[in-house]
Image (spheres, rainbow, N blue to C red):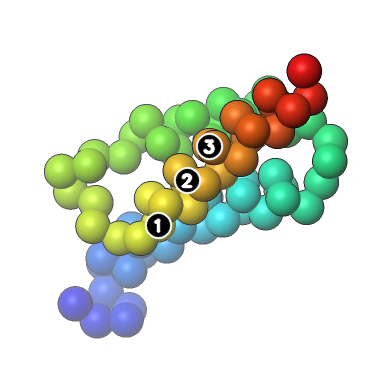
Amino acid sequence: MTSTGRYRKVWYCIRESGEAALAQLIATQENFPPQQQEFLAEAILRLDSEKVSSCGIFYLQAAYWKNRRNSAQAQ
């Protein structure tokens, strides 16, 4: 594995999608749009836990739980 190898591209895709969602959820008090919620769900559901070994999944999980918390607080 190198810093420019195939694994890095996969790792970045997972991490960056989670980071983007989490940043949106942290930075604003507005609702997370339904389309963004769908994108987040798709990003989580497409993961193959048998093959993913990067920390990127934690960003997706954090975004999921932050969205759940924001939704519960809004009600």
Front residue (pair 29, 43): 29
| Mark 3 neighbour class, 10 Å CA radius: few under 14, some 14 to 19, many 20 or more | some
* Quarter of the image where the C terminus is located: top right
Residue located 44% across and 38% down the image: 43
Disc 2 target residue: 60
Q: Name the spot of residue 60 as percent of width and height, x first.
A: 47, 46
Kindly identify which numbered label has been placed on residue 64: 3
Residue 24 in view, yes or no: yes
Residue located 70% across and 33% down the image: 70
| Residue type at numbered disc 1 | Gly
Disc 2/disc 1 C-alpha distance (Å): 7 Å
Disc 2/disc 3 C-alpha distance (Å): 6 Å
CB contact under 8 Å: marks 2 and 1:
yes
* Residue 66 located left or right of residue 56: right
Disc 1 target residue: 56
Image quadrant assignment for residue 35 = top right
Residue 33 in view, yes or no: no
Front residue (pair 14, 71): 71
CB contact under 8 Å: marks 2 and 3:
yes
Relative vertical location of residue 27 with respect to residue 61 in this rendering, above or below: below
Q: Secondary structure at mark 1?
A: helix
* Residue 16 located left or right of residue 1: right
Q: Name the spot of residue 28 as percent of width and height, x first.
A: 81, 46
Residue located 45% across and 43% down the image: 61
Image quadrant assignment for residue 7 = bottom left
Q: Secondary structure at mark 3?
A: helix
Disc 1/disc 3 C-alpha distance (Å): 13 Å
| Residue type at numbered disc 2 | Leu
